[in-house]
Amino acid sequence: MRSRPFPVALVLLALSLPGLTSGKPNFVIIVADDLGYAEVSFHTPHNAHVQTPHLDAIAAAGVVCRQGYVSGNVCSPTRAGLMTGRYQQRLGLYTGGEAGSGLPLSETILPGFLKPAGYVTGQFGKWHLGPTPEWSPAHRGFDEVYGFLGRGAHDYFKLDDPEDPIYRGLEVVKDSGYLTDRLGEETAAFVRKHAGRPFFAYLAFNAVHSPMQAPEDEIAKFNTGDPILDTRLAMGKRLDDAVGKVVAALKETGAWENTLLFFFSDNGGPLAQSADNTPLRGGKHTDYEGGVRTPFLVVWPNRLQPGFTDAVVSSLDVLPTVLAAAGIGTPEDRRPDGIDLLPVLSGARPTQPRNLYWSSASEGGWAVRSGDWKLVADRKGGGLFDLAKDPGESTDLSEAHPDQVTRLTDLHQAWLAEMAEPVKAGAKQGISEPPHSKRDRKKKKKEKRGDQAWSFPGTIHGPSQSHQHREPQSIGALGTERAALRSLGEELVDGDAVGFGNPDDPLGEFVLGNHDVGRVGHGIDPDGLRLLVACLETEQDPGIAADFPQALRF
């Protein structure tokens, strides 16, 4: 690990102070939602408008993991892997819909290991591992809970809505304020309340996930010319402020030095919402680096010297690292897939190449990283990439290195054979073949597409446009089955709103847009179909959900 200079005298002084190196460590896990790789100012490069001074201060005090990964490319699968320390696919949870429907109650999750060791535990914010109270984190080992269940999104200002409640423990509460602020305040209060005994705080923001909402005075601080980006930046700034409140509480109570803190995002940023994953390719819903590689910090002032590391780390490593730091053994029958990061990040053990795997089963593609090689297989083709030379995955090397394609495919197949069947209908793997050459890929797409011409009348809803009601029958030509959507080369997952149109007929667009989001992102997929995506949990927006058939909402 390459580190910043750190005065030895300060280290010796810190080690000599009473109480700083004794006792069980505290643990704080902070998870952002949909935060892009370049949306923190401790990364270089980063969006020039991004302001995250509190996260920058944490980065300066800890280890910046420049190759930090998560186990899923959407929200809830990553959270299932985080809480168990195992690939979520071992439980049959391949998709957002599967993991969001409930993490099996038979699984012991992180607080369940810590409580018997004397830890007090708190969960704050987004759960997304079961939609109703029987799945509540209050039943899973958390002593204190403040947050929401449901699906992946929540209104940031409506904190008293009985249809989408905020819970304190198992009780519905009516609150007010801005949700990101409240999560920071509640977590800071938990730290102050339990100072003097070992604690574990899990702070899971829903920021910067849609709906795109922030206080007007915060939005006014940004003027990029893009209203959605201005709002996103304001949401990120407010998240950073909330993190600052938690760190301030840790320092005020004297807990900071002996607290092991993690920060990362649950997946990459969604490109349709002006997210910035520079210099990485892709974003949320993809297994390219922009979808599964996120900002990643590990801080433990007592144990880890500040600096940077290029070691490959994963959100699956959090549980085994926490258990090792707490002196708690891992169960033999459910050994974590992650590793204890402390020997790697402290320099006690050299960095070793490792394998990481991703799979969305029948609903999407798959990927495997082995050493510096990464193989991606998706419905657009995918490719083989040398991440040491090409972290942006711009050059497909599958034709030049067929041996690596075969090796990585075999690795993934062997891993997949160990995983459980999906809890919902479908095969473990929707794409059985590794990436084809570009020439073969184009030929197959042309044969598949034939002479189809897709043209669906519709409207893109913006902030200045009124919401136009459309009867469900208006989308009959497209169909409401997921298979019909997949046949067009894209998928509808976890309630995201999507639309397809013929790029040769700009007026022939079909859009399931969100009038509250205010803008729909545009892109041209390799099949020549215009894809318009507004990352929206339609169940959280009754004003627009009523327009769409139930079959389109998961």
Image (cartoon, grey):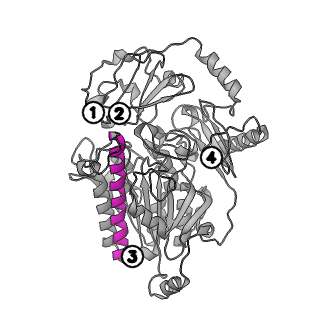
**Label 3, label 2: how many angstroms apart (C-alpha)?**
48 Å
Foreground label between 3 and 4: 4
**Label 4, label 2: how many angstroms apart (C-alpha)?**
34 Å
Q: Which residue is mark 2?
A: 519
Residue count near mark 1 (Cα–Cα under 10 Å), binned few <14, some 14–19, many ≥20: few
User: Residue 197 has which mark?
Assistant: 3
Residue count near mark 4 (Cα–Cα under 10 Å), binned few <14, some 14–19, many ≥20: many
Identified by mark 1, the residue type is Pro
Task: Name which residue lies at 54% across and 22% down.
Answer: 528
Location of residue 376 in the rendering, given as x and y in whole percent from the top left corner? 64, 39
Location of residue 509 in the rendering, given as x and y in whole percent from the top left corner? 41, 20
Q: Which residue is mark 4?
A: 357
Identified by mark 3, the residue type is Arg
Task: Tell whether label 4 touches label 3 (CB within 8 Å).
Answer: no
Of 42 and 94, the residue lying toward us = 42
Task: Tell whether label 1 touches label 2 (CB within 8 Å).
Answer: yes
Identified by mark 2, the residue type is Arg
Identified by mark 4, the residue type is Tyr
SS of the residue at dot 1? loop
What is the quadrant of the N terminus in the image? bottom right
Q: Earlier in the sequence, mark 3 or mark 2?
A: 3
Location of residue 195 in the rendering, given as x and y in whole percent from the top left corner? 35, 75
Please provide the residue range marked out in magenta. 227-252
Q: Earlier in the sequence, mark 2 or mark 1?
A: 1
Residue count near mark 2 (Cα–Cα under 10 Å), binned few <14, some 14–19, many ≥20: many
Q: From this view, report whether residue 423 is shown above or below residue 220.
A: above
Of 224 and 62, the residue lying toward us = 224
What is the quadrant of the C terminus in the image? top left
Q: Which residue is mark 1?
A: 463
